Image (cartoon, rainbow, N blue to C red):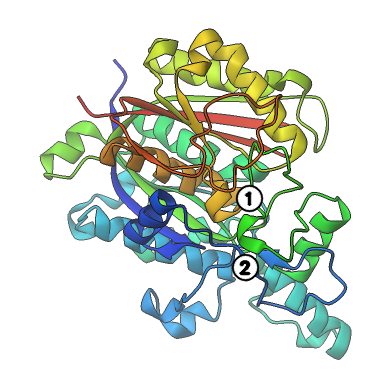
Amino acid sequence: MKRRVVVTGLGAVTPVGIGKDEFWTALKEGKSGVDSITKFDTEGFDTKIAAEVKGFNPGDFMDKKEARRMDTFTQYAIAAARLAVEDGNIDLKSVEGDRLGVILGSGIGGIETLENQFRTMYDKGPSRISPFFIPMMISNMAAGQVSIAFGARGPNETIVTACASGTNAIGDAFKVIQRGDADMVITGGTEAAVTPMAVGGFCSMKALSTRNDDPKAASRPFDKGRDGFVLGEGAGIIILEELGHALKRGAKVYAEIIGYGMSADAYHITAPAPGGAGAAAAMKMAIDDGGIELEQVDYINAHGTSTEYNDKFETEAIKQVFGSHAYKMIVSSTKSVTGHLLGAAGAIEAIASVMAIHDGFIPPTINYETPDPECDLNYMPNRGMRKGIKVAMSNSLGFGGHNASLCFREIV
């Protein structure tokens, strides 16, 4: 018999707030976190806007000396993990370290460190490269540092599936607990890629919005006037726990995770498969894994990037899977508020999905002004709505054709 797995802690470091409460309030109120880039001089860049984390002080969450030996994406992960552990009221001294795992996702890892150390080598020579360069840059170091910080000696891995990384990490953590390899896993995603090379690279692909004169209106999923995604940064961490383990320690339970699906488009390195076939396969797998009927899904937190093809094909995929029910449930994209956090996107969107169930509120898709005939579902335009939700789905679709979906339900 499969073990039941529940969500008992939430931690968020996002462009619209640090901590789950600030994050969730901003989503509910539709307050955009997009603004002009402050991390570097954008002269010569087509895109000059991003969703940066504001007011983050690593010293609030870790030793300052240790923080200097970490890339920002690792700092975000440790901060969000600490917030999740605190939110879950977890006494780590009473948790068996061998049964506590860490599974995180990151699409890009320590690109900030890579850029900085390349400049050092170019300007001063290879002898001046920091001895911490490699352990700061490599993508697995966020999971490694979190395990060290919290004494987690159980299953530990890093998932790199581009924009699906955070969702795949949570799904894999779910399965690790379900099959009995751990009792609790610190899981989610982290990213800190608002850097010259990352922004410049996405600009060269023509993937980013260039609505520089109106940053807060730039991320507009499913709107006919969408012109690209807005890069974001941050981390989302979820504590997943076996139900009996959670009840034994008197944990607060937000929701139960019941289904996970993943697939590949096997089509193109950046463009989604026509008709959203891969996304549809992942959604169907998550529903089947959860043992639920299509009609039980009340809400989908869409990948919804604000790019032409993603929004069109994700809409087609939802209709392919759900048929007539697609028009009865609600779909929204919280990327309209947060921007696109790449490997951390699925993690903060999983938190949004869990909070939608827990709080009985569906967050809006802001900046929705002009309907697109090819995107014809109920995207909860501009204003959220209080509504009881029994089952929520969260979708993530990544470059390389990676697709992942999660299903959460109210605890019964």
Upstream in sequence: badge 1 or badge 2: 2
Picture coordinates of residue 368 (x, y %)?
59, 42
Seen in the picture, residue 52 relative to 340 is either above or below; the reply is below
Q: Residue at x 73, y 66 (%)?
A: 213
The residue carrying pointer 2 sits among few (fewer than 14), some (14 to 19) or many (20 or more) residues within 10 Å by Cα, namely: many
Seen in the picture, residue 377 relative to 169 is either above or below; the reply is above
**Disc number lying in front (1 or 2):** 2
Q: Is residue 173 or residue 8 the one in the foreground?
A: 8
| Disc on res. 342 | 1
Residue 118, located in which quarter of the rendered image? bottom right
Q: Residue at x 45, y 84 (%)?
A: 64
Q: Is residue 167 or residue 384 the one in the foreground?
A: 384
Picture coordinates of residue 223 (x, y %)?
66, 39
Q: Is residue 121 or residue 290 the one in the foreground?
A: 290
Residue projecting furthest to the front: 370
Picture coordinates of residue 402 (x, y %)?
67, 33
Q: Determine whether, in the image, residue 156 is placed left or right of residue 323.
A: left
Identified by mark 1, the residue type is: Leu
